[in-house]
Amino acid sequence: MGRADPVTRAMTPGPRIYNLFPLLAGPLPRWTPHLERAHAMGFTWLFVNALHQAGASRSLYAVMDHYAIDARLLDGGPAPWDQLRDMLAEASRLGLAVMMDLIVNHAAVDSSLIGEHPEWFLRDHAGCIVHPGARDGAQWVVWPDVAQVDNAGSRDRAALWAYWRDVTLHFAALGVRGFRCDAAYQVPVELWRDLIGAVRARYPDALFFAETLGCTPEETLATAAAGFDFIFNSSKWWDFRAPWCLEQYAQTAPMVPSVSFPESHDTPRLAAELDGDRAAVLQRYAFAATFSTGVMMPVGFEYGFRKPLHVMETTPADWETPGWDLTDAIAAIHRTKAAHRPLNEEGPLQPVDLGTPQAFGFLKRTRDNREWVLVVLNLDRTATARVRIPPEIPARPRLAATDPVTAASSPISDLTEMELGPSATRIVHSG
């Protein structure tokens, strides 16, 4: 599954991804302060949503021209591709690998490809272009500004697949080192194998991340079988009570590592959802960083932004007055994650009984079972919780607890109980 044995790959730190939403960041030459801030927080990857020229709807995900950069991301200075190259070079200088959206399942309804290659697109019984969509809860939402590409049944499939290979290789040649594959489950596995193989033949270190949110574990695993390095999981929506999240983890973890996030460009802002509760927001980020191999957050999360990102309407004028500054705390969470191997692997994970419904905890081990951590969260946003150290943790002469929000550690003097403040998180490990 994927291009390397999961045990071997998991020996390196998991990806820490900063999603720099391009419409909020504005023209590429102005991105340096954002890159520097991401570096200072300990991120290792920069994820940039679609950069291509959008169609008439102005949605980043309605691509009109794959070989042009959206005019909203240019400042009229150097040539467009030079502006992108300069940004990629600056990210590389700061130790940030850049990942971009790869959208091969649809194109803008006003894309020139529809006229040039009509056989590349899916049509209904009346010969009209089919508009794709996605499930939102119990409802199917159609996207009228995009046309469904017929990757599976096109009469000119060889030329179509060659086009996708050329587009991906074009950006890889510019210095893009990762691709978030939008709606990956809607694309034939055979196309992903072809495309990923072609890129890896020239750029062996390129990574591919499959967007499979809303899929069943079976659908996710079928997609991942194409050679993806990571999937994105749905832990953001977990209430720590329902069994589904741990069940999905148990099914996918042995096969492909995942990335968690507390919010994304598609969700409401967590600061708004949690009514400005700073500690609760930080806890959700700490949970995301400890639950999965990788972690991602969008720009503005660190400042408590409340206005959702919008793939058509967001502009740099939507930059908000910070409600807080979590940059130091996020950097501490990243240092804590990097210090413990179980937090960088999709190893065995089991919930534990902490003796109180106020708290949730899980024991996470490395895939080789040699190392472990206990992650404890006080789910109560207003009251202190006393939790018992569960008997499941391996016997050690000394235990320590690390607060991921500060990266400060201290010995545990009482090996039976521990006290946590409201919305607090602790990482228990051998001292």
Image (tube, grey):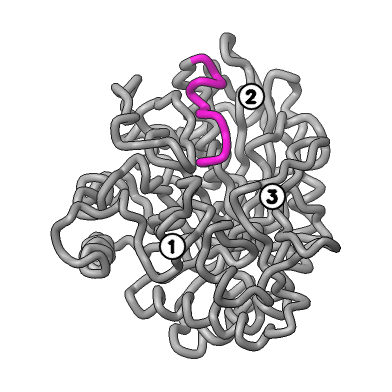
Residue 413 in magenta? no
Amino acid found under the numbered disc labelled 1 = Met
Q: Is residue 242 left or right of residue 395?
A: right
Q: Which mark is residue 213?
A: 3
Instruction: Tell me: residue 107, above or below residue 246.
Output: below
Residue labelled with disc 1: 99
Query: Is 423 in front, or is 145?
Result: 145
Secondary structure of the residue carrying numbered label 3:
loop
- The image quarter containing residue 119 is bottom right
The residue drawn where x is 45% and y is 80% is 169
What whole-number distance in Å separates the C-alpha atoms at marks 3 and 1? 18 Å
Q: Is residue 224 visible?
A: no
Query: Looking at the image, which is closer to me, 337 or 221?
Result: 221
Circle 1 SS class: strand
Q: Is residue 292 visible?
A: yes
Residue located beneath label 2 in the image: 417
Callout 2, which amino acid? Glu
